[in-house]
Image (cartoon, rainbow, N blue to C red):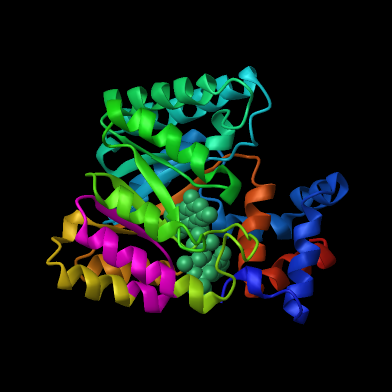
Amino acid sequence: MSGHDQVSSPFGRASEFVARLGSSDRAQRAVTASPAAREVARRFIAAENTGEAVETVRQNHTKGLRSTLEPLLAPARGVDDVRAAVGAHRELVQEVSRAGLASVAEVTVKPSTIGLGLSDARLAQAALGEICLAARNAGSLVSLDLEEPSTTDETYALFSLCHQDFPQLGVTVQSRQRRSLVDSRWLASMPARVRLCKGGYSQPWATGHITGQDVDQSFIACLEVLMAGRGHPMVATHDPQLVEATIQIAGQHQRAGDSYEFQMYHGVRPWEHRRLVDTGHQVRVHLPVGSDWYAYLLRRVTERPANVMPLLRALVTRR
Ligand SMILES: Cc1cc2nc3c(=O)[nH]c(=O)nc-3n(C[C@H](O)[C@H](O)[C@H](O)COP(=O)(O)OP(=O)(O)OC[C@H]3O[C@@H](n4cnc5c(N)ncnc54)[C@H](O)[C@@H]3O)c2cc1C
């Protein structure tokens, strides 16, 4: 069951409370100043700067894990923010390349951070093109996140434009969206890198599956299509049943081990990362990078009821 289904339980109310912390500057100051809350954050935040990020990529590599790096950035409000986002992604691919790790690390881009939704539509396209070019020159890769469901059409339009010049650009499908099967069929018809996830954004019944079971069934249907297709499926889930289903479906389609991959968050089910690698699967770990980790921490915490209590305890004890 996903975090969006938790609304009326005590955990659900605690999650709502934590979600509300996101809009309070005072709460942000209290959380970021609390050493105990920082400890909770350290579980999920791989690195606060580029040097630490490269080191974490190196450590992952020694364990047989690949990495995807996400600079923690707020949505762009104008050209300056877009330029800063391009710089942050470029720096990451260049530094992992300098460390000889470009082939085992990619960057992942939140479209809102490069200007998707701003009045000049060309901004995001130019920014994504620059990031893809820097990654290609560095020998690395780029994927596009999918954010709020209302941005799906725009995100896929952006993907289509850049994919022509950069066929290695990856894109995301959220099985929570009712349209996800149609999108998967479209994406499976080309040799594209496609990340399949449940989707971290709630949405109304008209456009999204609401129950966890429906989201999971939709996930399996999309998985079948992507595994049968021409591309490279990137299966982003920690759900044990979906992990097993992936292995089975990949086997049915006689997929070679390097023709698809699992993706999981840094700090979530780390033994599963190792188990999958040890049994011959490719696993890529998502590494958020930056000192501005507050919003990211709240997203991870509200996703999972069991994460709420350690954070609340950390705030109350004020260590
Ligand atoms: C690499 C990667 C990229 C992603 N990209 C996107 C994207 O572009 N757009 C988007 O909307 N969503 C994205 N997501 C988020 C995704 O949609 C889900 O919200 C998230 O992965 C949780 O769903 P799940 O499939 O792991 O299943 P769940 O049912 O949520 O979790 C299954 C199990 O995994 C563990 N688990 C899951 N999350 C946590 C957590 N936060 N803390 C501790 N344990 C946890 C628990 O053991 C849980 O029981 C991405 C996720 C990953 C890993």
Work out whether residue 79 or residue 33 is closer to the camera in this orientation and state it: 79
At which x and y percent is residue 153? 50, 42
- Residue 238 shown in magenta: yes
Work out whether residue 154 or residue 31 is closer to the camera in this orientation and state it: 154
Q: Is residue 148 visible?
A: no
How many numbered markers are drawn? Answer: 0
Left-right relation of 169 to 175: left
At which x and y percent is residue 162? 36, 29
Quadrant assignment, res 96: top left
Left-right relation of 161 to 23: left
- Residue 49 shown in magenta: no
Relative to 69, residue 173 above or below:
below
Relative to 122, residue 93 above or below:
below
At which x and y percent is residue 146? 50, 47
Q: Residue at x 52, y 46 (%)?
A: 288
Q: Residue furthest front?
A: 206
Q: Residue at x 84, y 67 (%)?
A: 316
Q: Is residue 255 visible?
A: yes
At which x and y percent is residue 38? 68, 54
Left-right relation of 47 to 307: left
Q: Quadrant of the C terminus?
A: bottom right
- Which residues lie in the magenta part? 217-243
Q: Residue at x 77, y 80 (%)?
A: 10
